Amino acid sequence: MRVVVTGGAGFIGANLVRALLERAEVEHVTVIDDLSTGARENLAGLDVSFHEGSVLDRDLLDSAFAGADAVVHLAALPSVPRSLADPVSTHHANTTGTLQVLEAARRAGGPHVTAASSSSVYGANPELPKRESMAAMPTSPYAVSKLTAEAYLGAYHHSFGLPVLPFRFFNVFGPLQAPGHAYAAVVPAFVDAALAGRPLPVHGDGTQSRDFTYVGTVCRILTSAVLGRVTSPRPVNLAYGTRTSLLELAAEVERCTGRPVTLEHSAPRAGDVPHSQADSSRLRALFPDITAIGLHEGLARTVDWFRTRHAPLSGSR
Ligand code: NAD
């Protein structure tokens, strides 16, 4: 099987490439990445074909998709604050980029297309847990870009028979996730600060909660989806229904690093939702054999990686 990973030099993508290459069924992996937030070093030593460029480039997509059996589309500008600073760039990369990927898939004869949407599409809808059938109420340009992108996947399934699978990722964390940039996610920001002896940066009072998913679990699901050609025009939450506040996360980081932590609170971030927790019924029905790696185990592996990581991975954006 030949698999293309867009955004494969990014955090989730580079973990996924490793997971795919471990599978005997996967003959070849091709990566497309414009390195806007990812880093070539994330793929160092891996046997992949690397196409540096944008998913907005039609010719590049055609050459990368030739002969592909499956595409995992992860390329995006993946940040709420960034989308507030520059909504149009987010729209181009995330929405138009997804449309270009789907068009290229159609031209390539219809490989299976899995893509990353986001729990941010639930936005202002306060209901918990988040069920895929709930009304989406995006509160940021990023969330709109992801909602539109997943809707395109569904439309391409219904209009052109393309086998698709849009996943709504929640808060994914793990090795290769860079801490040193303005839009860093909370886990790498906390672990990096704890190991450096700095206070942990908390937006708001820290009672906001998230459904954290270890990247190894996400990669198991994505690999299984690709190999099994699992298809669903309707989006599927990719999280297991846990709920951890940032204050609880800080305590867990303290346990895993063995370093006493202090917190530094700042103003809540615009566009952030107070709570997020997945209903995982659809995910469990589609992937009954996969169990999630828990927060403690995932954080312990993440802390290990932080302690041994190579310098270029930090601050790569
Ligand atoms: P990341 O920034 O590490 O990876 C995104 C990759 O896409 C980067 O390597 C970047 O260089 C590349 N890219 C960006 N624009 C591109 C373009 N126009 N053409 C080609 N490549 C481009 O982020 P990530 O956390 O690995 O996210 C992967 C996907 O998962 C994204 O679609 C993101 O929106 C989604 N997602 C992630 C999370 C999370 O918790 N990490 C949560 C929800 C959704």
Image: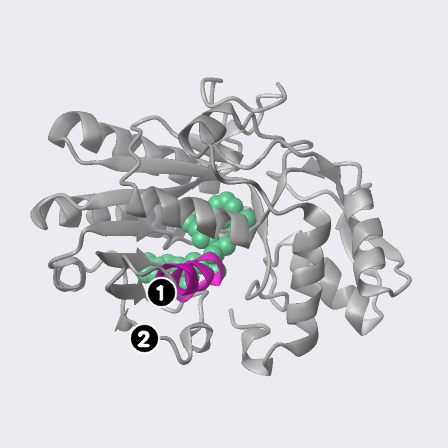
x 42%, y 31%: residue: 236
Labelled disc at residue 21:
1
Q: Element at badge 2? A: loop
Find residue 57 and report its image quarter. Answer: bottom left
The type of residue carrying mark 2 is: Asp
Classify the position of ligand 1 by quadrant: top left, top right, bottom left or bottom right.
Answer: bottom left
Using the image, determine if residue 309 lies above or below residue 153. Answer: below
Residue type (three-letter) at the residue carrying disc 1:
Leu
Q: Which mark is residue 47?
A: 2
Residue 99 appears in view: no
Q: Percent position (x, y) of residue 148?
A: 34, 34
Residue at point 73% right, 62% down? 191
Callout 1: few (<14), some (14-19), or many (20+) C-alpha neighbours within 10 Å?
A: some
For ligand 1, tell me if the residue under mark 2 lies within 8 Å.
Answer: no
Q: Position of residue 229 (x, y in %)?
A: 27, 40
Q: Is residue 300 left or right of residue 157?
A: right
Residue 228 visible? The answer is: yes
Is 15 a magenta residue?
yes
- Report the magenta residues as a range: 8-21
Q: In the picture shown, does residue 22 fall above or below 149?
A: below
Camera-side residue of 281 and 136: 281
Circles 2 and 1, Cβ within 8 Å, touching? The answer is: yes
Q: Earlier in the sequence, mark 2 or mark 1?
A: 1
Based on the picture, tell me whether residue 57 belongs to the magenta stretch: no
Q: CA distance from mark 2 to mark 1?
A: 8 Å
Residue at figure coordinates x 57%, y 21% from the top left: 125
Rendering quarter of residue 204: top right
